[in-house]
């Protein structure tokens, strides 16, 4: 058994997409794998997501957005993380990029 604390990940739906079945399946899988998962909810702004990541001291953000706005919203999240002093928080936008936009170490 590891003495390290579990990895803390925030899962969030950014933008106007309201379909959340997939992110809930991912949340359960990550939880079952031993991660500390916080599902932040639907229709969030980049500001709300980063505020949650800072408040919860997250190691990772898992963003899901199917609205086509990933080219605008993901860079905004990254900018806000830098401004909040959390450039170390990994971000994975697997919604459109199938992991190609993964930033930070791979955890699974």
Image (cartoon, grey):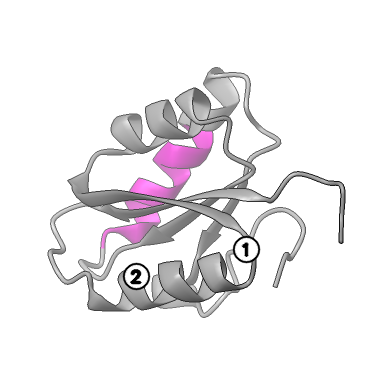
Q: Position of residue 34 (x, y in %)?
A: 64, 64
Kindly identify the residue that appears in the image at 66 percent across and 55 percent down. 103
Rendered residue at 52%/39% (across/down) = 78
Residue 71 among magenta residues: yes
Q: Residues within 10 Å of mark 1 (few under 14, many from 20)?
A: some
Magenta segment: does it hold 99? Answer: no
Label 2 crowd bin: few (<14), some (14–19), many (20+), radius 10 Å:
many
Lower position in the chain sequence, tag 1 or tag 2: 2
Q: Residue 63, how many percent across, how many down?
A: 41, 57
Q: Which residues are magenta?
A: 69-79
Residue nearest the viewer, comparing 98 with 57: 57
Number of numbered discs:
2
In the image, residue 5 sits, relative to residue 105, either above or below, namely above
In the image, 96: left or right of 48? right
* Residue at 50%, 76% in the rendered image: 29
| Pointer 2 residue | 23
Q: Which is more toward the observer, 28 or 73?
A: 28
Residue 46 pos. (x, y %): 33, 38
> In the rendered image, which residue does mark 1 sit on?
102
Please tell me whether residue 77 is drawn above or below residue 32 in the rendered image. above
Residue 35 figure quarter:
bottom right
Instruction: Provide the secondary structure element on which disc 1 rests.
Output: loop
Which label sits on residue 63?
none
Q: Residue furthest front?
A: 1
Q: Position of residue 27 (x, y in %)?
A: 43, 67
SS class of the residue under badge 2?
helix
The quadrant of the image that shows the N terminus is bottom right
């Amino acid at each position: 058994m590891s003495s390290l604390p579990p990895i803390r990940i925030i899962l969030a739906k950014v933008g106007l997409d309201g379909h959340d079945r997939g992110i809930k399946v991912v949340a359960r899988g990550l939880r079952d794998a031993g991660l500390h998962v916080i599902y932040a909810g639907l229709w969030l702004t980049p500001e709300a997501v980063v505020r949650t990541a800072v408040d919860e001291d997250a190691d990772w953000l898992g963003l899901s957005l199917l609205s086509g706005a990933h080219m605008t919203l993901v860079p905004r999240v990254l900018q806000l993380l830098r401004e909040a002093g959390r450039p170390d928080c990994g971000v994975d936008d697997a919604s459109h990029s199938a992991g190609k936009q993964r930033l930070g170490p791979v955890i699974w």
